[in-house]
Structures are given as structure tokens and as C-alpha cells.
């Protein structure tokens, strides 16, 4: 999905929110004791201003930013291309340092899987819920951060072994590049969160 499509989606979200506010305002004016809150009343206006930023804050926004940083490091380090080439050609076209990097990444992945298994599959494991389930549990709450940490660690290690990352600015630059690529999605998500929260406020 390119930026043009996302731009139109953002516009659609804004239009939906404006239409919802106008429809609810008309409905609440016609029936003040109905099932809607008047968005243009004193309390409604105060809510809009008071929650202008809070309505756009969500764990989903944080999750998107974490995954964007991980994706940036995955691309900038060259790990993504190496994995694709390894899948297509069996690694014949990879350089020595790339093959070494993939071996290290495989080791990191093994350690990650074993650690998560020990924390979730053993009886009374630390990341299970009080009833012994995975969903919901501390594990389910940390899935996205854990995946992001794994991808980021693997990508940084691969980038160092390959030579893609030669300095600290190179590493953090990959994070910035990932966030830059996902900026349209960040805007879309923020507008969508605001729209959803406003609609929730409008319905009693």
C-alpha cells in the first residue's frame, strides 16, 4: 500500500469522524435524553479539548513504532535480503560474512525460542496467567515487544558481522529509517484511534 492510498484512507477517517459528530449532534438535539452525548455541548467540547492527545495514545501505536524500528534494522542491516537470497538460492550467492551472520542469527533465534519456551511451557512458568493460560497473560502482553527485540537484536548482530553497521549512528539510523518508512501508517493509526475514541464518547 503506497502513500497515496494511505492518504485517502486518512481522509476517509477524518470524514467519518466529522460525519459521526454532526449526526450525533443532530440526534442529541432532537432527543436530548437519547442514547447519544451532544458533542457540541459544554461538556462535549471540554472532553474534546481535554482528550485531544489522549485519544490518540494506545498500545497499538507503541507496537507499530516498535515493529517499524525492527523492520528498519532488518532492512538496513541486509538481513532481510540475505534471508530471501538464502531461501531462493540455498545461500550460494551469499558472501562469507553474510553466511556467518546468518549462523549467528540462527543461534540468537534458538536462544530466543528456548528462553520463551522455558518462560511459558513449564508448569507455573513466569509468563503464564494466574490460571496457567497464555491468553491473556504477561506473555500475551509482551508478544510484540519480544518479537521486536528479537528482530532488532538479530538484525544488529547480522549488520555488525556483515559490516553494514560500522558505528552507533548506523544502528540508530536504521531505527530512524524504519520509522520514516512507516510514518504514513503512524498517521493513519493516530487518526483512527482518535476517531474510535470520539465515537465511544458520543455513545452513552
Image: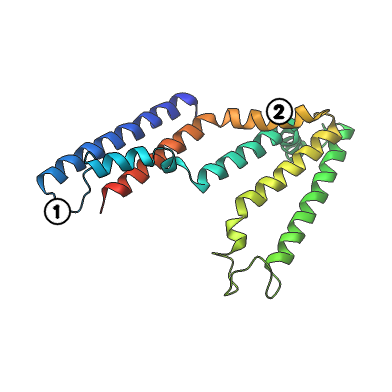
Q: Identify the image quadrant of the C terminus.
A: bottom left
Front: mark 2 or 1: 1
Relative horizontal placement of residue 103, taking residue 45 as reference (left or right): right
Circle 2 SS class? helix
Residue at image coords 31%, 48%: 201
- Mark yes or no: residue 198 visible: yes
From mark 2 to mark 1, how far is it between C-alphas?
Answer: 55 Å
Percent x, y of residue 140: 58, 59
Judge the density around disc 2: few (<14), some (14-19), many (≥20) Cα neighbours within 10 Å.
some
Q: Are marks 2 and 1 in contact (CB under 8 Å)?
A: no
Residue at image coords 40%, 31%: 10
Q: Earlier in the sequence, mark 2 or mark 1?
A: 1
| Residue ID for mark 1 | 33
Relative horizontal placement of residue 52, taking residue 74 as reference (left or right): left
Q: Nearer the viewer, residue 162 or 40?
A: 40
Percent x, y of residue 202: 27, 47
| Residue ID for mark 2 | 173
Question: Which quadrant of the figure has residue 125?
Answer: bottom right
Percent x, y of residue 183: 54, 30
Amino acid at each position: 500500500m503506497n502513500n497515496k492510498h494511505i492518504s485517502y484512507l486518512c481522509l476517509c477517517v477524518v470524514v467519518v469522524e466529522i460525519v459521526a459528530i454532526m449526526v450525533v449532534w443532530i440526534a442529541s438535539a432532537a432527543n436530548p435524553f437519547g442514547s447519544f452525548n451532544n458533542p457540541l455541548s459544554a461538556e462535549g467540547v471540554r472532553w474534546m479539548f481535554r482528550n485531544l492527545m489522549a485519544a490518540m495514545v494506545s498500545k497499538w501505536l507503541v507496537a507499530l513504532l516498535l515493529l517499524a524500528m525492527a523492520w528498519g534494522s532488518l532492512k538496513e542491516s541486509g538481513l532481510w535480503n540475505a534471508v530471501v537470497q538464502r531461501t531462493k538460492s540455498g545461500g550460494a550467492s551469499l558472501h562469507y560474512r553474510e553466511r556467518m551472520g546468518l549462523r549467528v542469527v540462527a543461534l540468537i533465534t534458538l536462544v530466543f525460542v528456548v528462553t520463551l519456551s522455558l518462560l511459558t511451557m513449564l508448569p507455573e512458568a513466569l509468563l503464564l496467567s494466574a490460571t496457567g493460560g497464555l491468553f491473556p497473560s504477561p506473555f500475551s502482553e509482551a508478544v510484540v515487544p519480544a518479537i521486536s527485540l528479537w528482530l532488532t537484536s538479530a538484525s544488529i548482530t547480522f549488520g555488525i558481522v556483515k559490516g553494514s553497521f560500522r558505528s552507533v549512528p548506523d544502528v540508530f539510523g536504521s531505527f530512524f529509517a524504519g520509522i520514516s518508512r512507516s510514518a504514513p501508517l503512524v498517521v493513519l493509526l493516530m487518526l483512527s484511534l482518535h476517531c474510535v475514541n470520539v465515537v465511544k464518547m458520543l455513545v452513552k
